[in-house]
Amino acid sequence: MIGTLEPYSRQMAEDLFSVFPDWEHFLSVVSEDGLNFFRVEVPPSPGTKNGPLGVTSLCNGEITVYFDSCHRRSGLAAMGYHRPKTWIISYSKALPGPTLVPLTTRQRSQLFSQLTTLEHAGIAPAQAFSVIGRDLPSNARQALTQIAMMLARGQSIADAGQRSGLLLPWEARLVRAAEHGGRLESLYKRLSEHYASRAQLFGRLKSRLIFPFLMLTLATFVAPFPALFQGTIGLSSYLLRAAGPPLLLYGGLRLLALAYRQQLARETGATWAKLLLAIPVLGGLLARQQQRDGLFGLLLLLESGVPILEALPLAGKSVADPLLRARFAGAAAALADGRSVLAETLNRYGVVDDADATALFASGAAAGRLDEAIRHQIRQWDAQLELQWDTLAEWLPRLFYAAVAIFMAWGIVGGYRGMIVPD
């Protein structure tokens, strides 16, 4: 019965019954909008005046715990019960889930590459997860061991991977769809290629920015030196002026990178998403990149056999921008009434804002080859994005050098100005 529940309800039901196994006898399934949720009502002890203790996943995407207090009434209602008060404690999906295992894009590419090889060789998933990842950090190896144990107990790869913290939520959704469609090897291969491409991009950006950052650090140590030499500032002030700017810059970049990773991992944080997208030039690139990633998720779901109406909102959840997620969900709702055309709907809701892409999707949908049309469009966007990222990586060092030159000139002139003694 648990296997028929929607993913979040299934995970919460398994966690609940692992602590209170006897409560599974009181489990019932409630269907709403085509999804199955659970309800557990534990009856009160004999002779008590309290109503049942209930737990349900039906209310507004939350886990709700409630209990009823009731008593007999006299007079006209002597044969019945007074309508009970319901006390509700809600646990939202936004509460922290399993601790996610931090892996770099290169490590994720290697992980899915190894899974591709073993899946192609016909190795059972439980055995595959027990032998891969020897070169990964210790916490990742522990997560792989946990996955292997859960798979041996009959859990699905998607549930085991998400509960261990190894799979990101959007990865788990794709794996769940690929499991049902029998296309795990294809999915693993595409995820490996996706992360390998992303690792190469990040590597180029880092390599081009390391030397300018070192030059900026050197400049911050040189600029306040004249003031230290003439004694107008002390050693502590000198170190603060010298080390402060590069540390603040490095910390800011790390914070932005952390915020982006957390959004992808937890699928929350509208404030951080708006902040990232508001950055000049970089924000536009990130917006286009997330649009591409959303269509990439849609492509993988379609290749796994998921219908388009189910695939659209699931693909939207794989992006960090909450506005883009809402666009995917809105497009799915508009298509559900059966009166909208796919390509026009995607364009109208902003999922695809390119006229050429809209025309391509329209022809692909008409020919029954939407996945091929999306794949072709993603290749075009990848080429454009690679060129734009390379251009950004080429110009950022130049901006750094200009900032270094201005900073050094300002610091040196300001430091020696105090050494000029007027007549």
Image (cartoon, helix red, strand yellow):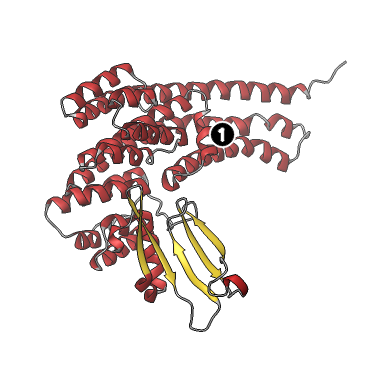
Camera-side residue of 315 and 397: 315
Q: Position of residue 352 (x, y in %)?
A: 35, 25
**Amino acid under label 1?**
Thr
Q: Position of residue 342 (x, y in %)?
A: 28, 27
Residue at horizontal 21%, vertical 51%? 180
Q: Residue at x 24, y 59 (%)?
A: 129
Q: Quadrant location of the C terminus?
A: top right
Q: Residue furthest left?
A: 121
Up the image or down, 345 lies above or below 178; here it is above
Residue 389 lies left or right of residue 215; in this view the side is left
Residue 287 appears left or right of 305: right
Quadrant in which the N terminus appears: bottom left
Q: Is residue 123 above or below residue 423?
A: below
Query: Residue at coordinates 25% horizontally, 63% vertically from top-left?
Result: 151
Residue 265 point in image, percent of width and height: 42, 47
- Which residue is at the far right? 423
- Front-lying residue, 39 or 70: 70
- Quick check: can you spot residue 138? no
- Nearest the viewer among 91 and 319 is 91
In this view, the residue farthest toward the front is 76
Q: In the visual, does 403 lie left or right of 107? A: right
Query: Which quadrant of the view contains residue 105?
Result: top left
Say if 271 sits above or below 38 in the image.
Answer: above
The percent coordinates of residue 85 (x first, y second) are 58, 65
- Residue 142 seen anywhere in this rendered image of the structure: yes
Quadrant of the rendered structure where residue 291 is? Answer: top left
Q: Which residue is tagged 1?
A: 217
Neighbours of disc 1 within 10 Å: few (<14), some (14-19), many (20+)? some
